[in-house]
Image: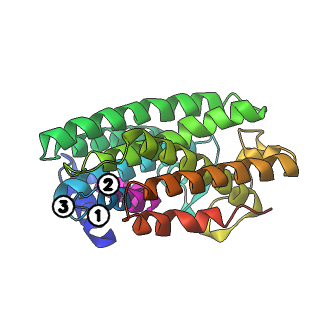
């Protein structure tokens, strides 16, 4: 599935009107990291009885990757996080300069919406667009809050909900858009699960950012160094309880999902490894 996603992203790049900028866009998109958002999307589509191998599902996945990559290009800028590494190579602004980072990031956002517009099913396209556009707004609002250096747990949680959890909520809602006619899973349950997982994912990312885990390929502790909205700025007991609370909520939500469908194995396989990574 990853190869097919790469292919559809390459097709989107090939549609750009000026070949000169293709290499820069590829630099921002590849390699694609863990591709956790497409994995969750495909699992949700399968859960609700949709076709997670369809071209429309790949278009939705590519849109999510484009939006996520755009946020990373902007997030790494000197005026934001000032990260110099991303996915094991120089951050985009280091390689291409700050002006190109701003504009290529904007271009990736535009390309993301263009991919949504290419979804063939009118019903799916409309629902994906609603979920996607709401998340795009919230990601930017979350970034604005983040650079104001929140320090209280409630403020940090709000940043996580907007910057990260909103996009995972959109992943769940985009997946739900592909549901079969006999799907009985409540949309609200999937949305809530997306938010919970997004919060946990960001909390674990903060932990990895500080401890310099190679899997996240970033300069260690960038958010913490700058006093940014990171759970790692809280006391050890507070951050452990924060992660444990969210993990328990996800387990409960997965259990509730299983009461509506016996087909939760794929989604559980994607999410469960993160539930076992909550210890300090």
Q: Is residue 257 left or right of residue 231?
A: left
Q: Quadrant of residue 266?
A: bottom left
- Tell me which segment is drawn in magenta: 22-41
Residue 18 lies in magenta, yes or no? no
Q: Disc number at residue 54?
A: 3
Q: Between disc 1 and disc 2, whose residue precedes?
A: 1
Name the residue tied to disc 2.
61
Percent across and percent down for residue 209 are 69, 57
Please identify the quadrant where the C terminus is shown.
bottom right
Q: Quadrant of residue 204?
A: bottom right
Q: Between disc 1 and disc 3, whose residue precedes?
A: 1
- Between 56 and 101, the one lying in front of the other is 56
The residue at the point 35 percent across, 53 percent down is 25
Percent across and percent down for residue 234 are 83, 43
**Could you tell me which secondary element the residue under label 2 belongs to?**
helix
The residue at the point 30 percent across, 38 percent down is 110
**Coloring scheme of the render?**
rainbow
Residue 39 lies in magenta, yes or no? yes
Name the residue tied to disc 1.
5
Percent across and percent down for residue 93 are 52, 48
Tag 1: Cα neighbours inside 10 Å, few (<14), some, or many (≥20)?
Answer: many
Nearest to viewer (mark 3 / mark 2): 3
Q: Is residue 12 left or right of residue 72?
A: left
């Amino acid at each position: 599935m990853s190869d097919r996603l790469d292919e559809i992203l390459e097709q989107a790049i090939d549609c750009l009107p000026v070949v000169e900028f293709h290499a820069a866009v590829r630099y921002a998109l590849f390699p694609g990291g863990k591709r956790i958002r497409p994995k969750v999307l495909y699992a949700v589509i399968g859960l609700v009885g949709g076709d997670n191998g369809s071209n429309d599902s790949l278009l939705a996945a590519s849109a999510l990757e484009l939006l996520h990559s755009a946020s990373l290009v902007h997030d790494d800028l000197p005026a934001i996080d000032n990260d110099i590494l991303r996915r094991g190579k120089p951050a985009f602004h280091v390689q291409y300069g700050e002006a190109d980072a701003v504009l290529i990031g904007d271009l990736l956002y535009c390309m993301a919406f263009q991919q949504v517009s290419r979804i063939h099913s009118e019903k799916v396209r409309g629902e994906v667009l609603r979920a996607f556009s709401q998340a795009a707004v919230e990601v930017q609002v979350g970034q604005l809050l983040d650079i104001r250096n929140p320090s209280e747990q409630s403020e940090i949680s709000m940043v996580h909900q907007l910057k990260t959890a909103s996009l995972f909520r959109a992943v769940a809602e985009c997946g739900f858009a592909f549901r079969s006619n006999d799907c009985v899973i409540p949309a609200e349950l999937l949305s809530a699960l997306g938010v919970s997982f997004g919060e946990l994912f960001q909390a674990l990312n903060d932990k990895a950012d500080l401890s310099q885990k190679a899997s996240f390929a970033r300069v260690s502790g960038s958010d913490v160094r700058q006093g940014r909205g990171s759970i790692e700025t809280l006391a050890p007991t507070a951050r452990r309880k924060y992660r444990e609370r969210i993990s328990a909520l996800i387990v409960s939500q997965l259990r509730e999902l299983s009461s509506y469908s016996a087909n939760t194995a794929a989604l559980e396989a994607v999410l469960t490894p993160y539930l076992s990574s909550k210890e300090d």
